[in-house]
Amino acid sequence: MNLPLVSVAIPAYRHAAYIETCLASVCAQTYPELELVLIDDGSPDDTFEVARRFLEQHGGRFRRVVLERSDNRGVSANSNACIAACTGEWVHLLGSDDVLYPGKVARIQEAIAAWNESGLALVHADADAIEADGSPHVTRRKARRPAPGPDRQAYRWLFHANLISNPTVALHRERFLALGGFDASLPLEDIDCWLRLSAHHAIGRVPEVLASYRKHPGNSLRQRLKMVGALFHAYAKFIAAHPDLIPQDELRRHYRHNLKRLWTRIRGKQPWRLPGIAAAVLGSYLAAPTPADYRRMGDILYAALDRPLPAA
């Protein structure tokens, strides 16, 4: 049976310590027909050289290899460039510090074929976590997961929680690019993109652990103020584009929940803003929040970070 070419895209940055392990996990995939696209985003360390040396020895594993180095442009722009450079219908997007299980690509592609879902744009699976040294990360928290299979209304749960494990993601290349890819103006590019895709296409979950997310001090999700501020901006953008997808009562509860998160993170940094946040909570009982309300609260967190605001 002739299997279709599947792409693996790695937007790499400052992961010289992890990139070889990442690439080795791609080489170990049981799916035979792979291409690899890796673009280093101007790393100040040896990420590109480590990748180049590894692929000099193992590049024959792939039907096609693209290895490039660019000026630094950020994770969103670099991810978009990687995916655009791929030629497979499906692109498995992988962080340069994360690791795939050997059957990851094969299992995702099997699910895509079995579902035969027209308009499918994203498939994801479950992931475990590892420490910087590769040892298992132990947690007692039980991760929430959406239902298995394709879902044409995935925005209903994505709007409340990003339950997509990024190392497991596979994207339909044309549908991803047609919606503009990742928005480089947003610091938290993934949830914005997943929400946009879910408003137009089906998203599917394979209920198996197929990758490992590496936890280390450089993870962007450890920057909690930045993360929550970016979420407010992503939510503002989504409800402005799709004002009727989220019911008004649900939107009010969602806004209050996130205001509580804002309160927790701002009270020790800018306590003079707390009365305004309290007023916003009370106001949400009277009227549903607007995109401007979400953006204003995100701006408060960006002010606490003492950094420029993202573009409108």
Image (cartoon, rainbow, N blue to C red):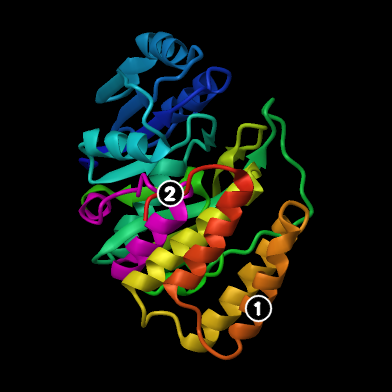
The residue shown at (23%, 49%) is 177
* Picture quarter with the N terminus: top left
Query: Is residue 200 inside the magenta stretch?
Result: yes
- Circle 1 SS class: helix
Residue range in magenta is: 175-202
Q: Residues within 10 Å of mark 1 (few under 14, many from 20)?
A: few
x, y (%) of residue 300? 58, 58
Q: Residues within 10 Å of mark 2 (few under 14, many from 20)?
A: few
Check the image and report above or below for 275 versus 50.
below
Alpha carbon distance from label 2 to label 1? 25 Å
Horizontal and vertical percent position of residue 301: 60, 54
Taking the spot 38% from the left edge, 80% from the top edge, the residue there is: 245
| Left or right: 126, with 135 as reference point | left
Q: Residue at x 54, y 59 (%)?
A: 298
**Where is mark 2, residue-wise?**
310
Give the amino acid type for the residue marked by disc 1 in the picture. Answer: Ala
Picture layout, residue 208 above or below residue 153: above
Vertical position of residue 278 compared to residue 216: above or below: below
Q: Nearer the viewer, residue 5 or 153?
A: 153
Q: Quadrant of the C terminus?
A: bottom left
Across and down, in percent, residue 189 comes to 43, 49
Of labels 2 and 1, earlier in sequence is 1
| Pointer 2 with pointer 1, Cβ within 8 A | no
The quadrant where residue 137 appears: top right
Q: Secondary structure at mark 2?
A: loop
Task: Residue 78: give its label.
Answer: none
Residue beneath disc 1: 279
> Is residue 30 visible to us here?
yes
The answer to whether any part of residue 147 appears in the image is no
Kind of residue at badge 2:
Pro
